[in-house]
Image (cartoon, rainbow, N blue to C red):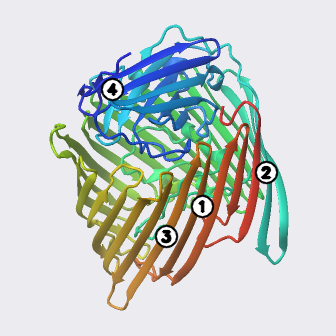
Amino acid sequence: MRLQYNLRSHGPAPEETVARVMADKAYIYVAFDVKQSEPIAASQFTNDVGCCVDDSVQIDLWPNGPKGFRYLFISTPIGTRYQYSSENNVYEPTWWSTGRITSGGYIVTMKIPLAAMHGTGSGNWAVQFARVVQRTNDDIVWSYGAQQQNHNDVTYAAGARGLPALAARRAQPRAGVYVLSSLQQQPSAGAATRAGADLSIPVFAGTSLVAALRPDSSDVEVDQQTIAPSAFARQVNEVRPFFTQGASFYNTTGYCFQCPATELYTPSIPTPRDGYAVEGQRGLFSYAGFDAAGIRRSDTAQVLNYTDPAQQNRVSVQRGTSDTQDVHDDTVSAGYTHDDLHHLAEWIRYGSDSGTNVAAGDRAQRYETGVNLYSPTGQVALTLRKIGQYYNPVDGFVAHPDIAGYALSASNDFRFAPSSPIKDVRLTAQFDRYQGFAGGSSQSDQWIYAQLATRKLWSIGLATGSAYLRLGSGVLSPANTGEGVVVYYGYGTATQSWAEFTTGRFGPGLLNAWTRVANVRAGRRATLTFELDDTQQFTARSTYTQWLERAAFNLQSGPDESLGIGVRRIIGTPPTLDAAAPFQIASNISIAYHRKAGNSEWYAVYGDAAAFSTVPAVIIKLIRYVGAEKGT
């Protein structure tokens, strides 16, 4: 098969890519022969670390077409591999890829076990081959359509013959058993040892029962601390396996531009004592539900999704509850989306919240409808929305309740010929107006952002605009840091570095903010990261100054092991919208070593990168997978 279409230019592929595939009763074998004149990007050496910063080839597999799960296998030119499944967000089966850079490109071969994929009982195989060139953003595919934007879209995949049916292959039970030993510097605690397990038990094809017994959250995670000014509460990424493995089933009610609300936001749920879930797909339906049982607390969620055979109509119904000794909350939401897969999409969404914190039931709903006109290079979307004063799910995230109005957003990507020194220019604009229950403006935003990217890996972005937000005191206050400029070098690569300056009225004074990040190579397999951020707000009464200093060392010592060391310090008084915040000072150091060995994983950890300040603890953790592999 020849990959002949470039989704970026919507024209012929600039260089040749040939894919070959064959299968036996146990494996699918794939070979790619790639011609490339651009410098080859191959900077990552540890599997599952640093995806999407190198050149790559991939195969998408739908064992039951649009009616089943999607499986994605990616390899870089040197054989570093990544994978994804819509069945489980922590999908990590054993498979093999090798890569070799040649004088005119590179060659990749893959060996994928059929046992790592599950049939759902109906439909035939669909396949897509794709290649990404990091330096040019070329996105080259085998099977395509004129309006296609995403190489992972099953609508444009092609049928495949000769691959064995998976419906008769029953998924195997899986257990991940862990033992953890920790030494913590606490007055009442010495050494402690814990144990627990993650279980997955197939019920029938495509559906499994999942359990987490004494789930552990001790793994060192990515440092998500920031001092970037924001008028709203910050969202963080979920990292706990019990919640991440089924995350793709939830919050699928369709388009949402500048979305102010998420009905299920699992970082708001404390790590449970035990968790139980069911997750699956059957025919045109996917479904999931979980019960996170904590200490004097229970959080549950259920969802049912439907997609029609043409992939044009989607319906989702979702419910979430939270119960503690003092609070009961129950949220039901539903959405419908239609997409003609050419240029027009429309959607409608509804939600209702009830429980202890809802003082007025007629002001605890969410209504939203919108339309999106799109092309291969841009879109214009209009959204009408209303979020009630008391619509605030305990297990959800609502950036700003009590708003009613509209939002208009538009963007377009202007692409230049390969001979031009400019790769592309992207323009983005947003305009919104919202009122509150009592009348008067509640929130308004208007801004324009332009970004120019060159073929020499430089990029510059310029922004202008303003924002206003009604505070709890009833004052409509400026909340603008949108005037600014950002300059990138190594744009889109593993060593991307940038400097950004923003300024604007923020509450009672002018706010200036700097972000400076440098990523540099330290040998072939190691990277050093340095960051220095600061904010300075000038008010009539005082000047509030805060800064963040961060450094990290990451070593990809092998395909299945890595080492990370991070230090961070935050000092000063953050900017204020209405009431002055307290002076902050905190430092953090974290060290993490991770290794995979067969059916086992090892962690050796000091501290916790996600904590505001260092948690003085040393943790040794062993996970042993029994039965099916991790995430399968």
Marks 1/4 in contact by CB < 8 Å: the verdict is no
Quickly name the residue at label 2: 214
- What number is the disc on residue 316? none
Callout count: 4
Badge 1: few (under 14), some or many (20 or more) residues near its Cα, within 10 Å?
some
Query: Between tags 1 and 3, which lies in front?
Result: 3
Residue shown at 53% from the left, 7% from the top: 162
Quickly name the residue at label 3: 550
Q: Nearer the viewer, residue 5 or 314?
A: 5
Query: Between tags 3 and 2, which lies in front?
Result: 3
Quadrant (top left/top right/bottom left/bottom right) for the N terminus? top left
Mark 4 residue element: loop
Residue shown at 66% from the left, 31% from the top: 632
Badge 2: few (under 14), some or many (20 or more) residues near its Cα, within 10 Å?
some
Quickly name the residue at label 4: 341
> Amino acid type of disc 4?
Leu
State the CA–CA distance, disc 3 to disc 2: 33 Å
3 or 4: tag closer to the N-terminus: 4
Residue shown at 42% from the left, 60% from the top: 520
> Does residue 411 show up?
yes
> Amino acid type of disc 1?
Asn
1 or 3: tag closer to the N-terminus: 1
Mark 2 residue element: loop
Q: Nearer the viewer, residue 556 or 318?
A: 556
State the CA–CA distance, disc 2 to disc 4: 44 Å
Task: Give the image location of residue 357, x and y in percent.
Answer: 60, 61
1 or 4: tag closer to the N-terminus: 4
Give the side of residue 85 with respect to residue 481, left or right: right
